[in-house]
Amino acid sequence: MSDALLQVRGIGISFGGLKAVQDFSLSLPRGGLYGLIGPNGAGKTTAFNLLTGVYQAQSGTVELDGRRIERLKPHEIAHAGLSRTFQNIRLFGELSVLDNVMLACHCRGRHTLLGTVLRLSRFVRQEAAMRRRATSLLELFGLARLADEQAKSLPYGDQRRLEICRALATEPKVLLLDEPAAGMNPSEKKSLAASIRDIRDRFAMTILLIEHDMGLVMDICEQITVLDYGVTIAQGPPRQVQQDPRVIEAYLGEPAKA
């Protein structure tokens, strides 16, 4: 796709004799809201780890807004504009809710050691701007009232939302969400779906999400890629993917009858 913001071509990785992800390709357009699904162990999180530099791809290329990023380190990829949440929440539990988000804001800061130590006017202005941005993001997710609470004290659903806030604070071009609805009740999932749509529209964000809740995926995603044993077995609109015999077989464990 000529308008692809994230262009992935044939990336793969093996661990010993196990081919965890093979020849994974994806074209994610600007403003797209795409899904990546598959049974447990299909290689979804491994694909995310390849995109974000946690693992180095052994083959293939990844381009973000025309820039090759597959050999960059995770923090360099985040600075380039690709941020993520994690399947297992990775907040700074001892820090406050506000500080978790402000730390991510520093990804775009331009502090100097001297300015920080002496608290020069430029440093003070940047810190004030970061605090305003962090507070605004917390308000968007209904977390502003909890700004001074320790992150680890939040209910599970609020911790999930905080992790999304922190990822947004890096001002990404593409946001990767790894099972954002995990552990949420139906009401929280409904609210999350609305929030994801709002993020895409409000920030002109491009989003790729992994999710096991098929109702949520089919409801909000425009295109879906399906992995099984590290191999892409289907790509397309939700209804087409939902009816694909290979997808049905992967989830049910037996061939679909004609």
Image (cartoon, rainbow, N blue to C red):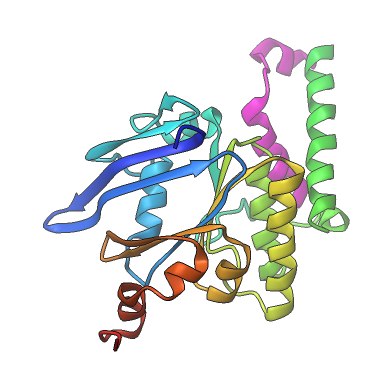
**Identity of the residue drawn at 79% across and 17% down:** 119
Q: Quadrant of residue 11?
A: top left
Furthest residue in direction front, as rendered? 258
Q: Is residue 210 left or right of residue 152?
A: left
Give the quadrant of the C terminus. Answer: bottom left
Q: Is residue 165 left or right of residue 141?
A: left
Q: Is residue 218 left or right of residue 61?
A: right
**Can you give x and y, in whole percent of width and height, for residue 222 in the image?**
56, 57
**Can you give x and y, in whole percent of width and height, for residue 187 in the image?**
74, 77
**Identity of the residue drawn at 28% across and 40% down:** 57
**Can you give x and y, in whole percent of width and height, for residue 140 in the image?**
82, 52
In the displayed structure, 211 sits above or below 257; it is: above
**Identity of the residue drawn at 71% across and 49% down:** 199
In the displayed structure, 54 sits above or below 106; it is: below
Which span of residues is magenta-colored?
95-120
Is-magenta flag for residue 81?
Answer: no
Is-magenta flag for residue 102?
Answer: yes
In the displayed structure, 77 sits above or below 195; it is: above
Q: In front: 240, or 190?
A: 240
